[in-house]
Each structure stands twice: as C-alpha cells, then as structure tokens.
Image (cartoon, rainbow, N blue to C red):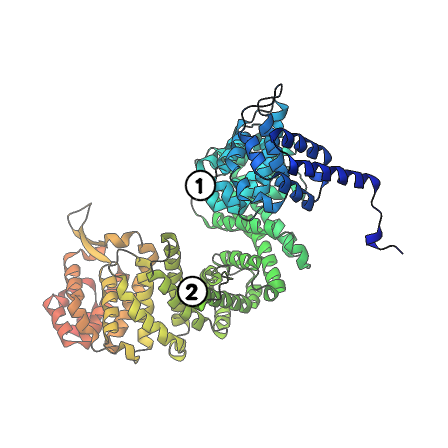
Amino acid sequence: MATSADVIPDDNESSKNATLERCLNMLRDARNDSEQFAALLLVTKAAKAGDVDSKTRRRIFDAVGFTFPNRLLSSKDPPEGCPGHTFQALGLTLLACFCTDPDLAEHPQVLNKIPTFNSVISAGDSGDTYCGSMIDDAYQCLGAILATPKGPRELVNRGALVALCQAYVSHSYSYDQALHLLVGLLTAAEVKCWQRAPSALTGVLETVSADFQKAEDMTKFQLCEALRHFVPPLLPPGSGCLQSLYRGLSSILSSKLSASQRDPALKLAACLTQACGSEWIPAGRSGSKFFALLANLACVEVRLSLEEPDLAAVDKKRELVAACYVLMEHAILECTREEGSLLQEVQKVQLVGILEEAFAAVVYYLRQAGWERLTDPFVFASVRILGAWLAEETSSLKPEICDLLPFLLRYAKLHFEAERKDRSSLQNPGCGDGREPVWQGDALRFLLPGLSHLTAEDQPRAILISEGVPVLLCRYFSHQWELFVSDSEAPFALDAVESTLQTVCAIFLNFVVAVPELISREACFTALMDALLKSLPSLRPQGEHLGLVAGMVTLGLMMARKRSAHPGLQRTPEAEGFFAAAITFLAGAHMAQPDPVGDSVVLQHAPVYKTAWPAVSELWLLGIQAFASCVPLFPWLPEVVLQSVWLQDLLELLGCVSPTSVDSELVTAFQGVLVELARTSRPCREVIRQHRGAELANLYGMAALEQCLS
C-alpha cells in the first residue's frame, strides 16, 4: 500500500510548480530592474495571489522583498507606451499580494505605506482601469492591516480614518469598501476614532443617514446595519442627521418585515436613544405613535427571546435584547415623565402593561440562568434593566420579585466585592496578579432605588434583613464615601456617587423608622454611626451637596436617638462636629425677607435651599424633630446650640416675621426644639426668656413652650 509520501503528484501541478520555481530563481538572480521587472511579470502569470498557499507567498516575498515595490511606487517614469501609473499599479498589486500574509500586513514597510494607500483611495478616479485596480488593491491592503492586532491604531494614527471618511462622503470609486472598513475601525477602536476625527465621522453619519432615508432596496437594510456604528456617545439634539434617521427607521418599523430586516432597526434606534434620549423623535402625534410602536416591539422581542427555555437560543439574541433593554428603559422614563413626554396618558397605561409582561420575562430569565452565569455581562444588563423598573414600579410582579430578591442581593454583593478587590489591585499594583478587572459594573447601584421602595414594605424588608442587606449597605456606604472624597473620579461619576450615597441614606432611614430595634441590635450600625460622625462635617457649607447633607443629618440624628450610649457620641470631637454640622443645616433653611406684595416681613426659604427644598423638605422636618429628641439624651448638646447662636437667631427670626407666614407644621417643629432646650438647659431657658420667648409662644400658639417657661 502506498503511503502519503509515495503519492505521485499531478503532472499539471508539477509543471506549474516547476515554472514558479524557475521564475523565483530568475527574480533572485536578476541583475537589474529590467530583468527583475520581467521576472516579476512571469511570477504573476505563474501564480496568482489566491492560487498559492501562505508558504509560497512568503517565498515570493523573500525573492522580491520590499525594496523593489518601494521603487515601483515612487517611480515617475513608466515604460514607453504605458499609462503614467503603471509602476505604481504593479507596486500596489505586489503589496496587496504580500498583505494576504498577516505577518507581512503588520510589517513596518507595509504600515509606512498607509499614507500612500490613503492618497490612492482619495484620488477616486474609476474612469481608468488601472486606477480602479489600484484603488481596489489599496482597499485590500488597508483591510489586511485592519485585521492585525495593531492595525486599527496604525490606521487611525496615519490618517486612514480621515481618508476613508472622505472617500465615502464624496462617493468615490468603491466607496462601499470605505464604509466597510470604517465599520471595522469603529468596532475595534471607537473611542480613539471619535477622539481623532469627530468632524469627519459626523460627515459620514450625515451622508449615510441621507442615503439610508432615500434607499428603497436592500441597500436600506445594509446601511441600517452599518449606521449604528457611526452614532457617537453623545449626539446634539439639533444634528442634521436625526430627521433622516427617524424617517428611515419609521419606514422600516412600520412595514411588515422579517426579523433579519427589523432587528438592525431596533439596534439603531437603541443607539440613537442612548446618544440623545428621545430628541431624535419629533413631538406630536406621529412621534408619539412611532415611539409607542418602538417600545412595543422592544417589549415583544424581550418576551419572545427570554421566555425561550433553551439558554443557547437566548445567547444568540443577546445583542438584540440588550438594545431592547435600552428602549425599555427610556419607555419607563417616558411613562413617568409628567411634562414633555412623547406619550399620551392612554398610551402610558397601555405601555406599562406591556412593560410588565416584558419584565416578567426578565425575571424568568434571571431565575433560570442567573446562578450559572454570574460573570456574564448579559446577566448584568438584565439585572440593571430590572433595577430601572423597580425604581419606578414595585407593586406589580411583587411575588416574583420577592422570590428573586435573594439572588439579586447575592449577585450585587458578589459584584461589589469583585469591584473593591479590583480597585484595590489597581491602586496597589504590587498586590495584583496582572489581570484585567473582571467585574462589569456596580450592580448594587442600579438596584438601590428599588430597594429604597421595598424597604418600606413588610415582606420584602424582612427578606432584605434576612439576606444581610444592612451589613452590605454599611460597607457599601463606606466604599462610596471613599470614592466621593477622592479626586480620582470624573465630575459626572461623582454626581452618580453622590446620588448613590443619598439613596443609601434613604434606605437606612426606612430601616430606622420601620424597625428601630434593628439599629440597636445590628453591630454594623455602630460602624455606620462612626462613619456619619466623621463624614458629615466635611460637607459644610450647605450650598453644595445639600441633598446628601440632608440625608446624612437626618439619618445620623435618628440613629443617635437609638444609640445614645455609643462611645462616639459622648462629647467627642467627632460628635461635636456632627451636631454642629446638623445645626448649620437645620438653621440655614429659613430667613426673613420683605413681603413683595405688602409692607410686612415674611419667612421664606434661604436661596441655597429654594431649588432643593422639594427634595429635602421632608428630611429637614424629620431632622429637626430628631434633633429635639436628642437634646435630653445628650446633656452637653444645649451648650453646642448656644455656641452656634442658632437658638438666638431662631427667636429673632420668629420675632421679626409675620406669624401668618409661618405654617403650622413649621411652628410645631420649632416649638419641639425650643421646649426641649428650655426643659433641659437653664441657660437656654434664660436665653429664650430674654428674647421674648413667652410673648412669641403666645403669638404663635406654642402652648407647650408657654407652659414650660411659666
């Protein structure tokens, strides 16, 4: 039996190989350019680039090298009777052949030719056969470079990005290849591309958008697929492309199409929504109808995809479902927006019902796949969108949500611990193992608003306590505070951290109000009390971070009532600083101002509080009531009040404003503080009497204060 080594080669194959060998020998032995040029022509006849394997192409390159193609590209004197760019065309053909080898495609000699390739595609003259061939070869070289690991960076740095943009905008020869390469570049290096050439890419976006709107054949769907790569992270509402994109998407989504034709449209709509909210959709009946359709399609797609019991089938559609998540999140926003919403009230009611069905599918998916795929980014995206729903709606799907809560909480804890570990490794390189961070994001931050609602209800609150949420949130608060006071976070990130801290304070307040014994029972609240004592004083003055100050003041005062024996509250510097900061917050809310419609002086909110008052008013009222409760628990506290001159200022304020400008709720709050100070401290009682306390008590109907002073 013959072995593979004994197989007799085909005569034609042997003859072709022999011819190629002779040509290669001629190339190696060529004594001048003419002989090398002639041998090179024979090589191209003996073996086309696509007819030989990589080993043979490499042998051709070894015989030719880069020197001769370089000279061909730079030569200005073509052979007699040949077009002016004959040598350049041959040089490009050689390089296109060489670039089929990935190792050669990233060779410095090829990368140095990127400006040459740019100039060729920018010329764009397809009237000449040679010129068209040169452009095709240049695109082939650029595509081969793009496919290498370092290629995208080199193409951006050496001007290919701008050249490709110009080629498409001008619709020059083979401009569809330019669009294909641009999509590849944006996929590989989106941030770098937008940093380097934002205006050029915006020009492509506007041109593709116009082509997209006009197309009435399969090109429309191809452009739709490509367009989402050209939508920048932030798109100004007045961008000229938005109208074309809306019209193009409207014509697609309002037609009966296959999934392969509809899905790219949903993805593009999601990109636009991420980039500029609903600004790309016109107001009015047509826009309202379109957005309702868009949200409905997204919800239906999520249901159909996530209710599939086969997880492998879900995996194939995760990119589409993630896009639908974006549209669903914006649908929630539109349903909860009171003014300026795209939707009418009837549409909102209908959409909420459809959203509920979609989120039932999200819950089903997480119960099915969650524990098996804890590090899967798609699971994270599913948890995030569920958090957006829970932030606005906790009454629907309550049994399903309660069943899922243990998973959500453990999942959030896992990601929080992974994030802390990775941040620690990045800050202390010697402690890390050199790997990239493995966490996808802060899952707990997206769940917090929903948890804030759930802690107000008995059944979910009991689950949260049993799952150790107070301990987790105490650690989370400390971690977020470290981020807040550091200089490493960007301003927009610090805003998110501040909002997160406020929400954590709100959750703890729910625990304090609903389960006050928990504050004394759980050891983690000791650490939280210490954190508040140390942190709050650094937030003064009150003009900035007022919402966070309100949350921390009120939480700290409410906890101090339950932990009055805590060592940290026994007139330590931290305790004095905390109560001084609390007094500053409570005392600064109101001031006397002339009545604009009369001659009297009235009580009004201080300027720095006016904007934030709807958000902090309840916290302020709860805080002043808690402060009054703290006065008899801490004998040294009245002295701090006197040192702050809050008591004197409050009495003077009440004495100079019209009593009718102070509402009854505010009178009750002020009386609570005055009574406790008068009962607890002789010096405070004397100050009250010296500032017409009895007269003011009678004037404002403060019977308890009158009785105390008499």
**In front: 269, or 71?**
71
Determine which quarter of the picture holds residue 402.
bottom right
Is residue 552 rendered to the left or right of residue 177? left
Q: Secondary structure at mark 2?
A: helix
Quick one: quadrant of the C terminus? bottom left
Q: Which mark is residue 371?
A: none
Q: Is residue 160 left or right of residue 362?
A: left
Residue beneath the point at 62% across and 63% down: 369
Query: Which of the two residues, 478 or 710, is positioned nearer the viewer here?
Result: 478
The residue at which mark 2 appears reads as 429
Residue at screen point 44% across, 43% down: 195
Q: Quadrant of residue 673?
A: bottom left
Q: Is residue 277 above or below residue 702?
A: above
Q: Residue at x 33, y 73 (%)?
A: 529
Task: Please provide percent x and percent y for residue 238.
Answer: 43, 35
Which quadrant: the N terminus? bottom right
For the residue carrying disc 1, how many other residues have a C-alpha within 10 Å: few (<14), some (14-19), or many (20+)?
A: some
Report the mark closest to the observer, 2 or 1.
Answer: 2
Residue ID at (54%, 69%): 406
Residue 156 drawn at (x, y percent): 49, 41
Number of other residues with Cα within 10 Å of mark 2, as a class: few under 14, some 14 to 19, many 20 or more: few
What SS does tag 1 mark? helix
**Residue that badge 1 annotates:** 196
In-front residue for pair 272/57: 57
Q: Is residue 175 visible?
A: yes
Q: Residue type at mark 2: give it.
A: Pro
**Image vertical order of residue 270 relative to residue 19, above or below:** below
